[in-house]
Image (cartoon, helix red, strand yellow):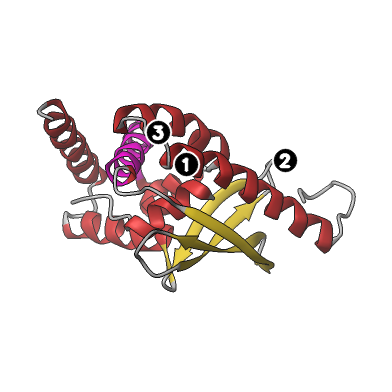
Amino acid sequence: MTFSVSRRGVLGFLAVASTGLAPVSAAWAAQDSRAFIQSFGDQLVAIVNSPLSLADKKEKIMPLVSKNVDIDGIGRYCLGRFWKVATPEQQKHYLVLFHQILANAIADKLGDYRGVSFTIGNVTKSGDDDSVEATLVRPQQPPAAMQWLVNSSSGSPKVVDVIGEGASLRLTQRNDYSSFIARNGGDVDTLLRALQKQIDHHNAASAQQ
């Protein structure tokens, strides 16, 4: 099995008020999320458009992703109901693997991009999240519209999902993982072995390049 993030979704993922605090106006919150995505996206697009090698791009981008994307939260969401079934050791192992899978998925897609730009559109509420509309522009390809979901309940904004072509990336991945585990008797270890096998295969292929 593979971490099935589309080319459009990966760059969207890259380019992507607590209770008890004083009330914040909707206009201010929307502007805050817009500025967050604009800043994050500017840094990412600059790296993607650079002449750096794929390995160097990965090295520069992953700290930005770790800082601005809620990878652990997305990982827990993707495991769905099996997160509560997993033991603490399985949960920890899974999140380590999930970080590696995401990093590899990003690195594999980056080489396909050059001359990328993006524009920010409206910001609306989507439950507890802000949905930031954006359009990705790539040379000789039609513009790609997407929505980046931003959550700031932790005190700082984080990208928690990307919706492209009407599909949620984290929901799609959760369905894939849940189906895989269910087909294997509900054993979380089967997913962990599959993810480790995918990582090993990726590393072996990279070493031959």
Q: State whether residue 161 is above or below residue 47.
A: below
- Residue at the spot of label 2: 155
Quadrant for residue 149, please give it. bottom right
- Mark 3: secondary structure: helix
- How far apart marks 3 and 1 lie (CA) works out to 18 Å
Q: Give the dominant element type of the magenta stretch: helix, strand or loop.
A: helix
Give yes or no for residue 93 being in the magenta stretch: yes
Residue range in magenta is 86-109
Query: Could you say where residue 133 lies in the image, as x and y percent from the top left?
Result: 59, 65
Q: Which mark is residue 71?
A: 1
Query: Could you say where residue 131 lies in the image, as x and y percent from the top left?
Result: 62, 63
First of labels 3, 2 by sequence position: 3
Left or right relative to 52: residue 13: right
Q: State whether residue 146 is above or below residue 208.
A: below
Contact between marks 3 and 2 (CB within 8 A): the answer is no
- Mark 2: secondary structure: loop
Name the kind of residue labelled 1 in the image.
Ile
Q: Residue at x 51, y 49 (%)?
A: 15
Residue ranking furthest to the right: 22
Left or right relative to 67: residue 4: left
